[in-house]
Image (tube, helix red, strand yellow):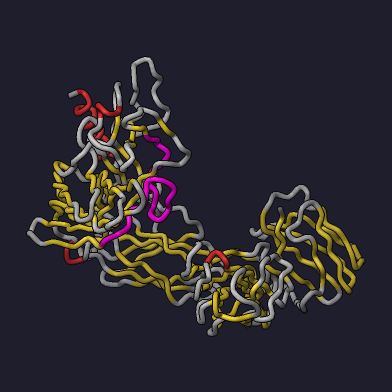
């Protein structure tokens, strides 16, 4: 009785704390087993089944084999409240540890139904779950108050150890052998994951009365559904599907779709160069009238990353901010339309070359220069090639700079591996026609260049450059100056064919951190020993003008 009173108090208390649009759903029936050892005594006596098929269970932080044993500094909080720090206000309430607290689905087609004690209209449901013995597929049905239903698409629930395939809500709370009482506390495990289910617009004004869950996979993984929460529709719901379009050097357009209850006074938007979420009291940047679902963002600074949030204005109240959706002004994308073959090499490093690279050329408009580079592409295997045998690196032929590491694929099977890297400073300061080269290799499969075992898929390799306004004139040609080592440690060497009059080093905020002038030499050194690790821009002034090059400090 004491534990149940604690549970009821905790549930009421945390419900009051939640943000207005998140609700921990009260499951009045549906749990079928107790997988959380708690209190004093053997785990076998305080549980009815294991979390997996190997007789392991979860444990509460108040679990003790005997009163003489110390309590654990880990374990699940006896209140049963699980906070999702990544989504403030979204919390879960576990069932009491002294009774059934898991919907345990072991075999294919095993099913259970959660009856909801606090029916709510919602735009999304969040399921707190994990598997023992590998990954399992979970599906089901949502039931509404008008007797209509919505199918839950089958989704993979990961194993309670190691995975990041779904958002990890909480982890590192340990487990205990149900038969042995041996407590384990591996770093970062076990884990509870969050599986999100979107409620269709036509069902969002209906109240959810129950939820069926069914195991749809054949594999031996045991699915444990621990709790459910919802994003309530509320009286002033947020807009949906926020996107950015028509991005230029100084402007962009933000678009969204109306919620099922359209706000009477339109929408408000908040624009920031920070990803820090606005709070309800944050002053909006602007607003639009009722029925308008787009806003033009003007007066932006080129080469800057912005984030935007949208909320409904219902007159007497405002909805919650939906976002962020982020974008960068002053970007140019160029895509290679062709397959890029790979060259066989049993070992690949930054000194490796290839006779069959892919190339693209970015034309930088007059008056602008490149400040950073991003790239993305897919590499696909064939025959019996593996994804882990893929190697690649991006080179800027115009500046003579390349990435600091060769990138490798992951996976000892055939398949397609996607690559996406940003913030590369291999073309800083470049203007005019700037050429990039993607070098790709494979460590298995015949010899020479071909697409037989691994290739970069046609139309997937894109180079994206971010621009800034060009200050001063520039005559930039490949390898005018040699800069080494890069990445730098304590000393940066600069040498060239022209007399160097001045060098200056800037951080990515544009602040000058080092400076030397009056040099009048073709070679010089710059001490970088006192600088923090990170990316910098080196500006070199010589008789032909000023050049900028990206520098990495170890």
Q: Please state the horizontal and vertical placement of residue 79, each as a whole percent of the image.
A: 29, 32
Give the extent of the magenta segment: 154-175
Residue farthest toward the top in the current orientation of the protein: 68
Most distant residue in the bottom direction: 338
Question: Residue at image x 37%, y 15%?
Answer: 68
Residue 330 image point, x, y percent = 56, 73
Q: How many marks?
A: 0
Q: Position of residue 441 (x, y in %)?
A: 62, 72
Name the residue rendered at 46%, 37% in the picture.
186
The image quarter in which residue 461 lies:
bottom right
Residue 319 within the segment the image draws in magenta = no
Q: Quadrant of the N terminus?
A: top left
Q: Quadrant of residue 464?
A: bottom right
* 134 relative to 48 in the view: left or right: right
The residue closer to the viewer here, 466 or 264, is 466
Q: Which residue lies at the image location 63% right of the left edge and 65% below the top edge?
A: 424
Q: Nearer the viewer, residue 426 or 233?
A: 426
Expressed as whole percent of the image width and height from the top left, the position of residue 496 reads 86, 71
Residue 415 seen anywhere in this rendered image of the structure: yes
Q: Closer to the camera, 489 or 50? A: 50
494 relative to 90, above or below = below
Residue 313 in sight in this render: no
Residue found at the very far right of the displayed protein: 521
Q: Is residue 155 magenta?
A: yes
| Residue at 22%, 34% in the rendered image | 48
């Amino acid at each position: 009785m004491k534990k149940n009173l604690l549970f009821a108090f905790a549930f009421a208390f945390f419900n009051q704390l939640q943000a207005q649009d998140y609700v921990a759903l009260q499951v009045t029936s549906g749990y079928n087993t107790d997988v959380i050892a708690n209190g004093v005594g053997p785990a076998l006596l305080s549980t009815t089944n294991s979390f997996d098929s190997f007789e392991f269970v979860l444990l509460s932080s108040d679990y003790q084999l005997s009163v003489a044993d110390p309590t654990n500094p880990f374990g699940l909080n006896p209140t049963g409240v699980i906070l999702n720090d990544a989504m403030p206000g979204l919390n879960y309430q576990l069932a009491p540890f002294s009774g059934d607290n898991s919907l345990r689905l072991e075999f294919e087609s095993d099913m259970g139904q959660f009856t909801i004690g606090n029916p709510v209209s919602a735009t999304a449901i969040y399921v707190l779950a994990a598997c023992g013995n590998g990954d399992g597929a979970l599906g089901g049905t949502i039931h509404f108050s008008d007797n209509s239903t919505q199918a839950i698409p089958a989704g993979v629930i990961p194993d309670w150890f190691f995975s990041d395939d779904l958002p990890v809500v909480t982890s590192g709370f340990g487990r205990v052998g149900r038969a042995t009482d041996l407590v384990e506390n591996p770093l970062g495990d076990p884990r509870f994951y969050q599986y999100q289910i979107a409620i269709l617009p036509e069902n969002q004004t209906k109240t959810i009365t129950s939820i069926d869950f069914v195991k749809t996979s054949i594999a031996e993984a045991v699915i444990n559904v621990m709790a459910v929460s919802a994003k309530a529709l509320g009286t002033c719901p947020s807009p949906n599907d926020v996107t950015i379009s028509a991005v230029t050097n100084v402007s962009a357009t933000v678009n969204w779709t109306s919620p099922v209850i359209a706000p009477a006074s339109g929408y408000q938007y908040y624009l920031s160069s920070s990803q820090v979420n606005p709070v309800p009291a944050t002053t909006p940047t602007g607003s639009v009238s009722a029925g308008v679902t787009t806003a033009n963002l003007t007066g932006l600074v080129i080469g800057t990353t912005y984030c935007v949030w949208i909320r409904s204005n219902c007159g007497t109240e405002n909805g919650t901010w939906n976002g962020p959706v982020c974008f960068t002004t002053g970007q140019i994308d160029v895509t290679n339309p062709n397959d890029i073959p790979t060259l066989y090499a049993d070992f690949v490093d930054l000194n490796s070359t290839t006779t069959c690279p892919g190339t693209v050329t970015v034309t930088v408009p007059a008056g602008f220069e490149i400040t950073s580079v991003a790239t993305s592409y897919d590499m696909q295997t064939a025959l019996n090639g593996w994804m882990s045998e893929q190697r690649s690196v991006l080179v800027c032929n115009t500046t003579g700079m390349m990435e600091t590491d060769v990138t490798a694929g992951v996976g000892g099977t055939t398949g397609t591996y996607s690559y996406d890297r940003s913030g590369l400073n291999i073309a800083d300061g470049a203007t005019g026609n700037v050429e990039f080269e993607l070098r790709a290799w494979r460590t298995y499969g015949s010899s020479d260049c071909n697409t037989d075992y691994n290739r970069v898929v046609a139309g997937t390799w894109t180079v994206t450059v971010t621009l800034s306004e060009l200050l001063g004139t520039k005559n930039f040609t490949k390898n005018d100056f040699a800069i080494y080592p890069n990445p730098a440690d304590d000393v940066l060497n600069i040498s060239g064919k022209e007399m160097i009059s001045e060098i200056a080093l800037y951080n990515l905020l544009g602040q000058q951190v080092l400076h030397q002038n009056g040099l009048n030499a073709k070679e010089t050194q710059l001490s970088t020993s006192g600088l923090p690790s990170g990316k910098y821009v080196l500006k070199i002034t010589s008789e032909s003008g000023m050049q900028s090059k990206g520098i990495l400090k170890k």
